[in-house]
Amino acid sequence: MSTDAPGARDSVQGWRAFPRSPVSLPRPVMDAFEAFLKKRHPKATSRRIDAATADLSEAFTEARGSLPGSYLNQPAVRSAYLAHFHPQQVLRGIAALGEVYARASARKLWPQRAEGALRVADLGAGLGAMSQALLCRLARGDAPTSWPEFVLVDHQKSALSDARELTVAVASAVAPDLPAPRVRTAVERLDRWVSRASRSGWRYDVILLGAVLNEIQGDWQPLFASILELLDEGGVVVVVEPALLETSRKLMELREFAKDVGTSIAPCTHDAACPLLATRKDWCFTVRPAVFPRSVGRRAAQMGHQSAEVRFALWAFRPGPRAEVRVADPPARVVSDPVLRANTREQLLCTADGTLRVPPLRAARRGDLAGPAAAAAD
Ligand SMILES: C[S@@+](CC[C@H](N)C(=O)[O-])C[C@H]1O[C@@H](n2cnc3c(N)ncnc32)[C@H](O)[C@@H]1O
């Protein structure tokens, strides 16, 4: 990564990062995924999954255009997605939503309803990874007394039918005593469903977009603007995308487009212009240590992929009047690896006043929060 961020300020001593613990899937959730795979795809041998995973992996990165729009409707592809990509996507979701939930709750920005369940729309739901990650996050800490209700929207019918069952299975795995959440599905293209929802006056408290915008060709802004209109007052939208340059930068542009009409909850620690966007080559993403299920880690290592961390680009946003910045918040986010510049090793932090160059912070990864050495972690 280049450190030639316009406006980057000189090296400052005395900062530290707040490294985060690895994310993992609760054991009962892994068991639920395995049981579902065996039940729904009895012909999915390890060898077939390995081969389909390798093909899909290539299609997701190098040759995205070659991916047919209905890829999850093909059983061999869907079983590979379920066995390999889905658990990793749930891990990304747990990491992303964990941070969003913590930061939003600390600023009193996590939506609450006086009556009735929280209304969650998972758009481009696929197998429902984001909804399941949200369930895992809500089940942590204080035992939940009720679940949100979900609507899962996708144009791939078979995926949605699996998504519904998996979401109910995950809810039961993480809180066996709670009644199952209400999970509805809509098999429809996003633009059509969003217009229908808007015309019908449907409103949501949380809208989840997991790895779907990158499958939408062209400008994301018109669709995103109409998605924002589906949020009820105080609602939040959470976008999780692959940590690739082009996709992450498009997400950063989306934030720039919307930043004056609301509050960024994560990853940004401020609502000022994105300093990385002013550069040409840099992009904002999070790296989080993760414990992969054994078979997923084995396959990832065989393909030369990361097997002990997840990476993702994140943006969580609440439209409406700008919320106060919490004074106790760590003021900066680590946005580079340590790099050598003019014979000095340094790392870049993103702050409200632009990027800040500091000596490399101990054990810091991209996406970690950072603050003056005396500050407390979030
Ligand atoms: C990579 S998958 C991600 C699924 C899930 N959200 C996750 O985080 O794992 C992308 C999903 O978006 C869906 N999708 C892409 N474009 C869509 C569109 N225009 N309308 C509805 N669904 C779409 C695909 O069918 C697929 O299920």
Image (cartoon, rainbow, N blue to C red):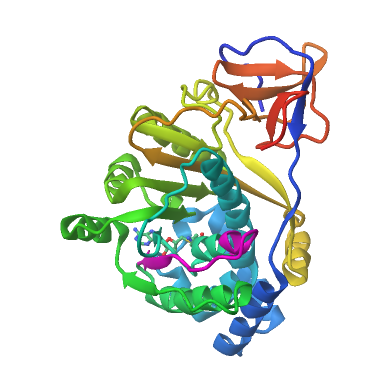
Q: Ligand 1: which quarter?
A: bottom left
Q: Residue at x 61, y 24 (%)?
A: 350
Report the front residue among 119 and 54.
119
Percent of width and height locating residue 153:
36, 65
Is residue 246 one of those drawn in magenta? Answer: no
**Part of the protein shown in magenta:** 136-154
Report the front residue among 63 and 166.
166
Q: Quadrant of residue 369?
A: top right
Query: Measured along the vertical axis of the image, is residue 238 above or below residue 8?
Result: below
- Residue furthest out toward the left: 199
Residue 83 lies left or right of residue 292; in this view the side is left
Report the front residue among 54 and 159.
159
Q: Quadrant of the N terminus?
A: top right
Residue 208 lies left or right of residue 199; in this view the side is right
Percent of width and height locating residue 165:
49, 80
Q: Residue at x 68, y 44 (%)?
A: 287
Residue 153 lies left or right of residue 240; in this view the side is left
Percent of width and height locating residue 331:
62, 25
Query: Measured along the vertical axis of the image, is residue 37 above or below residue 325?
Result: below
Please give the count of numbered marks on the rendered protein: 0
- Residue furthest out toward the front: 114
Is residue 153 one of those drawn in magenta? Answer: yes
Q: Quadrant of residue 160?
A: bottom left
Query: Measured along the vertical axis of the image, is residue 4 above or below residue 368?
Result: above
Percent of width and height locating residue 377:
71, 35
Q: Quadrant of the C terminus?
A: top right
